[in-house]
Image (cartoon, rainbow, N blue to C red):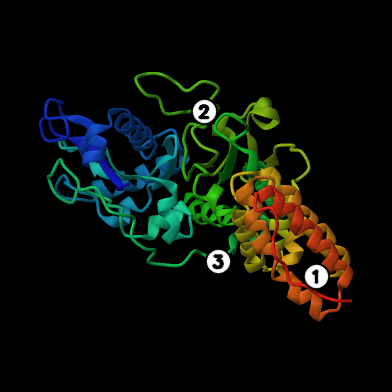
Amino acid sequence: MPVEQLTFTVVEGGCGFNPEAATGYQIKACSPGLVKDAEARERVANICTHYGQAVYDRISSVVSQAINEENDWCRRQQEPPETLPPEVLKHFPVVWSYDRIRDDLFALIRTCYLGFCPDRKPGNFFAHALVFHPDDLFAFDYNPIVLSRSGCFWSNHVNDATELQSLEDLGTAKSASAPINMLRQSPYREHLEAILSALTTASPSERPVVFCLRDWGQVPQIVEELLALLPPATRCRTTFCTYENDRSWVPSVRGQRPEKAVAAHQLLALCGAEDRSWNFYADDYRSKFALFNFVGSRFSELPPPRPFARYAANCVQRERTRELGAYHQLIEQLDAGRAPEAWDALIPAATILKFETPREDFASGVSAVCAVSNQPQQSEAAIRVLLPWFAELADGDRLQDISLLSSHVATLAERAGTGSCQVPAFSE
């Protein structure tokens, strides 16, 4: 399906997507797919409106400081300025939000402060949204925040058109995924297992993960690194916001708030110099969110980390992210990329990705692959994973393990509906 796009800002009356609208915040332009899809268009516009308000929310200490910079610069000008220079705009937060629009349709939206409205009053913003299927992120390592570096997003009006083209695809990444760096450092490394464990089960309605940080500029890299630790099928569907001013806000369509929604995203960041302004309640820490308040050094009490979270965090600390990537590949081969329970169950199988696996680990690894592969397609994939081990075991004279492997492959062949699977014959 094509990639759709939409822009949102202050538009003078009659100059936007809806020519009947008066001057104000509205859709400036959108592509044909969103012209026809009113529900998706309204949802994206609702998100743009919220984060447009967030980038000029005077209550926020981050924005308040930026407004002081703006006012100081304006006072130094001899005449009322029409635009703001980059050295002023850089103080205002840029918001990247990744939202599920419906079913398997998502939007990555960039929202930034623009400066003056047509009447020369401050507070204008500009949002540019791309709407796509998450599998379209294959050229970006299935990591939506990597798309932010693609050059696809605008920070201002390109022209006065009210129609935008649908894109054939998202293009290709202009830079590789960032290496895991920040998560290895304090204070994140001490909490990485807990963060990952919470993120694997978080949803907008079930304990979303909330980060509290001082510097909004660090959040995109942290989000990118966290998502990189998840299997691709989940990575490209994990919703986030890099700068939130209302942790309980959720997008609405036609005034309807989604039932049971706690927040708009699975992962969101609150940013500021101190945490008093967020007014956290005991229930926020205890049950509503998985809260990691790095500003106030207070954190939610959470269940023990899941096995996958411990394994992934260990790979990060030992600088073995390639090993983690191979494990992700195994998970995806077994069609378990969106099943955290399977990620935990397959941990013993991480050892069989390396042919130097000790005998005692081999048995548990093969058993884990077989236990997870219950569906025919999974069983066929599991056989393909295990077959190369026959030659390796024969070279090592591990006939007992060959017998074990043959038994499991036969079981998988039955589940796959193939009846049997031809394996190499070895004599004792």
Q: Residues within 10 Å of mark 1 (few under 14, many from 20)?
A: some
Reading the image, the residue beneath label 2 is 248
Q: Closest to the observer: 138 or 9? A: 138
Say few, some or many: other residues with alpha carbon within 10 Å of mark 2 (under 14 / 14 to 19 / 20 or more). Answer: few
Q: Earlier in the sequence, mark 3 or mark 1?
A: 3
At 66% from the left and 42% from the top, the residue drawn is 198
Residue pointed to by mark 3: 179
Q: Position of residue 200 (x, y in %)?
A: 64, 44
Q: Which one is in front in this view, the residue at disc 3 or the one at disc 1?
A: 1
Residue 31's place in the image compared with 410, above or below, is above
Kindly report the distance in space between the C-alpha atoms of the residues bearing marks 1 and 2.
48 Å
- The residue at the point 32 percent across, 55 percent down is 169
Residue at (46% x, 28% y) in the render: 250
Q: Quadrant of the C terminus?
A: bottom right
Asked whether the viewer can see residue 315, the reply is yes
- Label number found at residue 357: 1
Query: Circle 3 sits in a helix, a strand or a loop, which is it?
Result: loop
Alpha carbons under labels 3 and 1: distance apart: 27 Å
Q: Are marks 2 and 3 in contact (CB under 8 Å)?
A: no
- Give the amino acid at mark 2: Ser
Residue 290 percent coordinates (x, y): 65, 37
Q: Secondary structure at mark 1?
A: loop
